[in-house]
Amino acid sequence: MIRCLILHGPNLNLLGTREPEVYGKTTFDDLNRRLKEFARDLGMEIRIIQSNSEGQLIDAIHDAMTWADGIVINPGAYTHYSYAIRDALAAVRLPAIEVHVSNVHAREEWRRHSVVAPVCVGQIIGLGPRGYRIALEAIKEIVEESHR
Ligand code: DQA
C-alpha cells in the first residue's frame, strides 16, 4: 500500500473561516475528512499533520522518511522563505508535491516565489481543496511508476 504524508503549514487549520473569499468555505476538518475518504478509495494510507511552527513541519518531514512513500505539502507562508523546509524536503528525497489552495500568482508579488518548488516534483496551485486530491493521485502514480 502506498503511504503519503499530507502536511499543512501555518494558518491552514483556519480554512473555512480564514479569508473565505480567498481560500473558500471548505473547513479544515471537511478537507481532511474528504482526503481520508479519497485515500481509502485509492487504496492509499495517509497521515495528516498540521503545524504552525517550522520545526514541527521539519520534524514531520524527517519522520516521513521512516514510513512514507511521498509527501503532499502546503507550507503556507513558509513556501516563500523557509530554506529550512526546502532543505528538509531535499534531505529525505521522497517525491513531494506542493499544493496551494489559492492562486498565488494572482495575488501579491511576494507570493509568486516558492523556495520549495525546486525540490518538489510539481506544484498544484489555485484549484482550491481539490488540489490536494489531485496531488495525492499524482503521488500514487509517481510512486507506482518508480516501482516498475
Ligand atoms: C497558501 C498561499 C500562501 O501564500 C499563504 O501564505 C497561505 C496559504 C495557499 O494555500 O493558497 O497560508 O499556501
Image (spheres, rainbow, N blue to C red):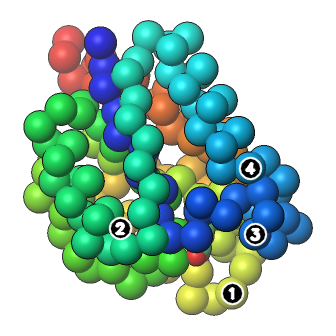
Question: Mark 2 = which residue?
Answer: 116
Would you say the beta carbon of the disc 4 residue lies within 8 angstroms of ligand 1? no
Residue 98 placement (x, y as % from top left): 45, 54
Q: CA distance from mark 2 to mark 4?
A: 25 Å
* Type of amino acid under label 2: Val
Question: Mark 4 = which residue?
Answer: 27
Q: CA distance from mark 3 to mark 2?
A: 24 Å
Question: Mark 3 = which residue?
Answer: 18
Q: What's the mark number on residue 108?
A: 1
Residue 11 placement (x, y as % from top left): 58, 70
Residue drawn at the location 20% of the way across and 12% of the way down: 148
Residue 58 placement (x, y as % from top left): 24, 64
* Type of amino acid under label 4: Thr
Q: CA distance from mark 1 to mark 2?
A: 18 Å
Check disc 4: other Cα within 10 Å, few if <14, some if 14-19, many if 20+. some
Asked if the residue at tag 4 contacts the one at tag 3, i.e. Cβ–Cβ closer than 8 Å, the answer is no
Residue drawn at the location 67% of the way across and 64% of the way down: 14
34 or 115: nearer the viewer: 34
